[in-house]
Amino acid sequence: MPVNRAQQRAATRQALLAEGQRRFAADGYHHVVLAEVAQAAGVTKGAAYHHFDSKAGLFRAVVREVQHDLGERVAAAAEQHEDLWEQLRAGCRAFLAAGTDPAVRQILLVDAPTVLGWDEWRTLDEESSARHLTEVLAALAAAGVIADEPVDALARLLSGAMNEAALWIAQGGDPQAAERALDRLLAGLQVRTLTARATTNPRMSRETRD
């Protein structure tokens, strides 16, 4: 079957994205040259500029793809569980595990905040993995599993902590230690944990009543 122009354009764009992701992950944004990406992808430099305008444009598109893939990875891990609390734990663990992925480490955690700027980076993050985190926290609050705190603020706090932990893992930190710390952090959100502490701690119970 003959390949039409739309298919050719799509194939060219995908080849540039794939090669761009490989190079950005391996070399970092500042060491990548768009003309070399085009040559390695088997297309002309003009085609690269036609699709993305600049190296920054290609990088922005690559960030979107990596963010989307990470969001899907987090969602897939969460969906393996029916219990909302286990969905939260599984999704957070999947995010931490992604710190060992060179694309996530270099592209999302190291380069994207500085190249794109914090505001744009946060917007992209909220469209993918951060959105899933907000959704499950809202569901847990509605179910009474966690305190009915402002979910948006809580999601940002947890997201920031996990971004730092994922970067720490990527730089040689202990993934199991990070997971244990994450479980302790999450356990502190549970209403039943707070209630149990108050029951077994007379001073806390008096303070709560007061």
Image: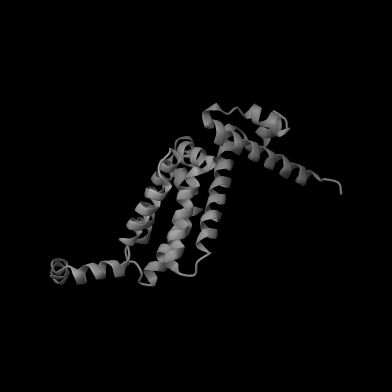
Question: Could you tell me residue 179's position as x and y percent?
Answer: 40, 52
State which quarter of the image contains the C terminus: bottom left
Report the coloring of the rendering. Answer: one colour
Can see residue 56? no
Q: Residue furthest right?
A: 1
Query: Who's the residue at 38% across and 58% down the image?
Result: 152
* Among the 4 quarters of the image, the one containing residue 103: top right
In-image side of 206 versus 84 (left or right): left
Q: Is residue 28 above or below residue 13?
A: above
Q: Nearer the viewer, residue 160 or 174?
A: 174
Q: Position of residue 38 (x, y in %)?
A: 68, 31
Where residue 93 appears, x then y in whole percent? 45, 54
Judged left or right of residue 27, residue 12 is right
Q: Give coordinates of residue 87: x percent, y percent.
A: 46, 63
User: How many labels, in total?
Assistant: 0
Q: Is residue 138 left or right of residue 38?
A: left
In the figure, 15 relative to 153: above or below? above
Kindly identify the residue that appears in the image at 68 percent across and 35 percent down.
50
Residue 99 makes an appearance in the image = yes
Q: Residue 199's quadrant in the figure? A: bottom left
Towards the viewer: 139 or 7: 139
| Depth check, front residue: 106 or 114 | 106
114 versus 2 height, above or below: above
